[in-house]
Image: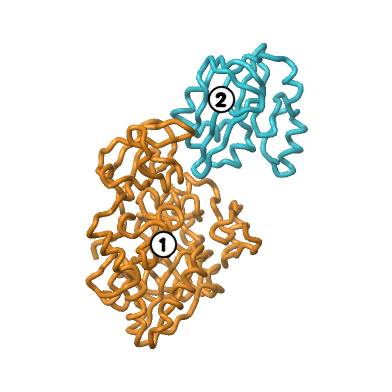
Chain colours: A orange, B cyan
């Protein structure tokens, strides 16, 4: 363990005052729960949950060469992005394995922001700046420290943000953003999230984030808005089979086997990892990331072995109880021949093979506002 | 401060034990369930199984974590709370009542006196539970 002190978000004092249980996460001291993970999960699915995700990192890249730099770094086609649009993407190493997953925002013609995972900020910063050092007219700025981020997620998120915003947020489509004030705090209002619910992620200056958080809580309290910790953030994303870096994807998994082929666009031109991923695509992936459901009563967890007829065939990367599906569910890499929905598998739990099967995902139907 | 009933004995691993005639009922404490958070799965031995004091007899799983359960005393399992398979959240709701886990017929007498008293257990959790 490193002796580096844990970092705190601009909302640390709010969490402590609310009685949150604080835990270390990716170098940060974060709220894992306030009242209880299952209750907070249900609040998000039925009303609206507020998430402090200020630990996430934000880098900006600006200049005539910004688009070329991002095209080279990321797997998705940045040229397809209009100003005001957002794209999910992946940073790969030369061998096609994953540095991080991220969202790319086109802020202006020659200006972009990328949002990266908290635990990867230093690694990603080194990767993007070194990998593009030879490229012209792309100036990088690490805005992570000065930026707070609050996710507002759930069926009542649009109404809540709408009441506090100085503009019509219903007009912001999925994976699009606008700038505007929310609770008198200047924000970037992004229609994105990590829960499968409709909602927004609000980027704010670090020194305005507490004001934004308090305004949202105050305005939403009557209809059940409540803070939600990382525990429920994890069960919510698990029910959607959204990958979590460090669990389901990392520097040992390639983007194609992880099911992220939909953001790998070799036709756009050269990018880091392209050649390796093209080889994998031609040869076919050896294993696939699938959703599993336990048939026997047992909880699959990260790191448990997956077997078929007693032989090792893969590994569980995420697993827990899914409160909205009321089942024990998981995400696992399995050999490609065993990846079809309905395939019977076993998960080794405390020395015993427990029955599981591959199921369709997401486990819980997505409510995001895709049509716009 | 979590509830610590005076008439029970306790382990350092946060199980409680209650004398009922010549048998002992076992569960986990209010403090333990608070620390675990939402209990979503409980795995218990079958009736007739032997348990050994301070040894693992099962697991309790919350959303985030797996925790071993430790027997307060040695003996034979004579009853198991089968309700917990369907309603593991009972452990959170009523840890000293409907959330009980086992009834054990002790095989030795001396072990009971080695368990923590309510006062000793209160001191343990006041120090953070370790």
Q: Is residue B78 above or below residue A351?
A: above
Residue B34 image position (x, y, % from top left): 60, 40
Q: Quadrant of residue A197?
A: bottom left
Residue B119 image position (x, y, % from top left): 77, 32
Q: From the viewer's side, name the closer residue of A274 and A218.
A: A274
Circle 2 Cα neighbour tier, 10 Å, few/some/many (<14 / 14–19 / ≥20): many
Tell me which residue sits at (31%, 64%) in the image: A276
Check disc 1 and report its element: helix, strand or loop. Answer: helix
In this rendering, the label closer to the viewer, 1 or 2? 2
Q: Is residue A63 above or below residue B2?
A: below
Residue B109 image position (x, y, % from top left): 72, 15
Q: From the viewer's side, name the closer residue of A56 and A134.
A: A134
Check disc 2 and report its element: helix, strand or loop. Answer: loop
Q: Which residue is mark 2?
A: B101
* CA–CA distance in space, label 1 to label 2: 44 Å
Q: Which residue is mark 1?
A: A160
Tell me which residue sits at (34%, 68%) in the image: A273
Tell me which residue sits at (75%, 24%) in the image: B114
Badge 1 sits on which subunit? A
Quadrant where the N terminus of chain B lies? top right
Whether residue A276 appears in this view of the structure is yes
Badge 2 sits on which subunit? B
């Amino acid at each position: 363990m490193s002796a580096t002190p844990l970092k705190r978000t601009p909302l640390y004092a709010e969490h402590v005052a609310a009685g949150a249980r604080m835990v270390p996460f990716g170098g940060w001291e974060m709220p894992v729960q306030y009242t209880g993970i299952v209750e907070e999960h249900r609040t998000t699915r039925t009303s609206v949950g507020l998430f402090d995700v200020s630990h996430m990192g934000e880098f900006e890249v600006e200049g005539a060469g910004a688009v070329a730099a991002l095209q080279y770094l990321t797997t998705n086609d940045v040229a397809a992005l209009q100003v005001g649009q957002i794209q999910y993407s992946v940073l790969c190493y030369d061998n096609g394995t994953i540095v991080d997953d991220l969202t790319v925002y086109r802020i202006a013609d020659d200006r972009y922001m990328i949002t990266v995972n908290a635990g990867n900020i230093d690694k990603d910063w080194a990767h993007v700046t070194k990998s593009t050092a030879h490229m012209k007219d792309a100036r990088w700025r690490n805005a992570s420290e000065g930026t707070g981020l609050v996710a507002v997620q759930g069926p009542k998120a649009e109404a809540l943000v709408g009441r506090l915003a100085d503009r019509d947020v219903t007009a912001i489509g999925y994976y699009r953003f606008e700038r505007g004030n929310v609770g008198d705090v200047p924000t970037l209002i992004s229609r994105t999230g990590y829960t499968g619910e409709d909602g927004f992620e609000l980027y704010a200056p670090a020194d305005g984030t507490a004001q934004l958080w308090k305004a949202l809580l105050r305005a939403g309290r009557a209809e059940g808005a409540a803070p939600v910790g990382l525990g429920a953030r994890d069960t919510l994303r698990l029910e959607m089979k959204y990958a979590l870096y460090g669990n389901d994807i990392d520097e040992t998994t390639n983007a194609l086997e992880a099911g992220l082929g939909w953001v790998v666009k070799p036709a756009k031109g050269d990018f880091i990892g392209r050649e390796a991923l093209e080889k994998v695509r031609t040869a076919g992936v050896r294993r696939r990331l699938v959703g599993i459901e336990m048939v026997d009563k047992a909880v699959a967890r990260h790191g448990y072995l997956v077997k078929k007829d007693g032989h090792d065939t893969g590994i569980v990367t995420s697993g827990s109880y899914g409160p909205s599906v009321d089942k024990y569910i998981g995400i696992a890499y399995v050999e490609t021949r065993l990846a079809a929905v309905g395939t019977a598998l076993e998960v080794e739990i405390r020395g015993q093979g427990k029955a599981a099967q591959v199921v369709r995902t997401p486990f819980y139907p997505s409510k995001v506002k895709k049509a716009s | 401060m979590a509830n610590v009933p005076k008439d029970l004995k306790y382990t350092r691993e946060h199980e409680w034990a209650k004398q009922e005639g010549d048998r002992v009922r076992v569960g986990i404490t209010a403090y333990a369930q608070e620390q675990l958070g939402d209990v979503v799965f409980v795995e218990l031995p079958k009736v007739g199984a032997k348990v050994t004091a301070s040894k693992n007899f099962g697991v309790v799983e919350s959303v985030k974590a797996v925790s071993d359960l430790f027997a307060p005393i040695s003996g034979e399992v004579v009853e198991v709370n089968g309700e917990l398979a369907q309603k593991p959240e009972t452990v959170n709701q009523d840890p000293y009542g409907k959330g009980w886990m086992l009834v054990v017929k002790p095989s030795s007498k001396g072990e009971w006196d080695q368990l923590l008293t309510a006062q000793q257990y209160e001191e343990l959790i006041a120090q953070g539970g370790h």
